[in-house]
């Protein structure tokens, strides 16, 4: 069973109300009410009212459907905040250097949906097959070479490590290579 409640034209900006709503999303109803009750945010009071309204809506819908519902089994399925209108007041606030700023009063709309259905699996718990595949994937990614600017310093270091082995075969300078080539020619004759 699912029940929804919305509170419209709440005072305060949507951004500030979202900070409170993010704290209760996915929690049990009792835990969410406790968070709202003891939160220091101003929007928490009106969001708590909306939450209690959603609980009452769930009870009412259950009675109409002739189904018994335990309010303790409810959890916050979705909770979101939409931006409301900005009241265009013709009042101004003094600003520096003789200017004036127009006052804007923000409003928001809060919607909360509760459910007593089974919760989806948590993100932290994964099946065993996925857990085994992760280390193999990690090892594979470490073997891959990275390109771009990140690879340039590594390529230089790798070249320096290979250089001592190659130095035994090749001469260090052009002059030495010319001398070696001439000596090889004379040896062949």
Image: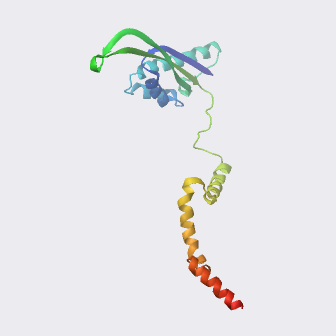
* 29 is higher (above) or lower (below) than 127: above
* 132 is higher (above) or lower (below) than 87: below
* 49 is higher (above) or lower (below) than 188: above
Residue at (56% x, 15% y) in the render: 57
Can residue 79 be seen from the camera position used here?
A: yes
x, y percent for residue 132: 65, 54
In the image, is 188 to the left or to the right of 47? right
Give the total of numbered labels. Answer: 0
Q: Residue furthest right?
A: 189
**Quadrant hosting residue 106:** top left
Residue at (54% x, 25% y) in the render: 79
Can residue 74 be seen from the camera position used here?
A: no
**Quarter occupied by the N terminus:** top right
* 133 is higher (above) or lower (below) than 104: below
**Quarter occupied by the C terminus:** bottom right
Along the line of sight, which residue is nearer the eye, 25 or 12? Answer: 12
x, y percent for residue 110: 50, 19
Residue at (38% x, 22% y) in the render: 42
**Quadrant hosting residue 169:** bottom right
- Which scheme is used to colour this image of the protein? rainbow
Along the line of sight, which residue is nearer the eye, 141 or 126? Answer: 141
Q: Residue furthest top?
A: 90
x, y percent for residue 43: 42, 21
Q: Residue furthest left?
A: 97
Along the line of sight, which residue is nearer the eye, 93 or 64? Answer: 93
x, y percent for residue 84: 49, 16
């Amino acid at each position: 069973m699912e029940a929804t409640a919305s509170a419209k034209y709440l005072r305060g900006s949507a951004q500030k109300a979202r900070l409170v709503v993010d704290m209760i999303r996915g929690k049990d109803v009792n835990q969410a009410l406790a968070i709202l009750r003891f939160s220091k945010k101003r929007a928490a009071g009106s969001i708590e009212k909306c939450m209690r309204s959603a609980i009452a809506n769930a009870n009412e819908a259950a009675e109409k459907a002739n189904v018994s519902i335990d309010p303790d089994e409810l959890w916050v399925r979705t909770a979101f905040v939409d931006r409301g209108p900005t009241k265009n007041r013709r009042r101004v606030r003094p600003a520096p250097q003789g200017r004036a700023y127009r006052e804007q009063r923000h409003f928001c709309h809060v919607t909360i949906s509760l459910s007593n259905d089974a919760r989806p699996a948590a993100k932290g718990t994964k099946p065993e097959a996925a857990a085994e595949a992760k280390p193999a994937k990690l090892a594979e990614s470490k073997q891959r070479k990275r390109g771009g600017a990140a690879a340039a310093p590594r390529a230089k270091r790798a070249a320096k490590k290979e250089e001592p082995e190659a130095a035994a075969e090749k001469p260090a300078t052009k002059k030495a290579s010319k001398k070696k080539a001439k000596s090889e020619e004379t040896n062949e004759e």
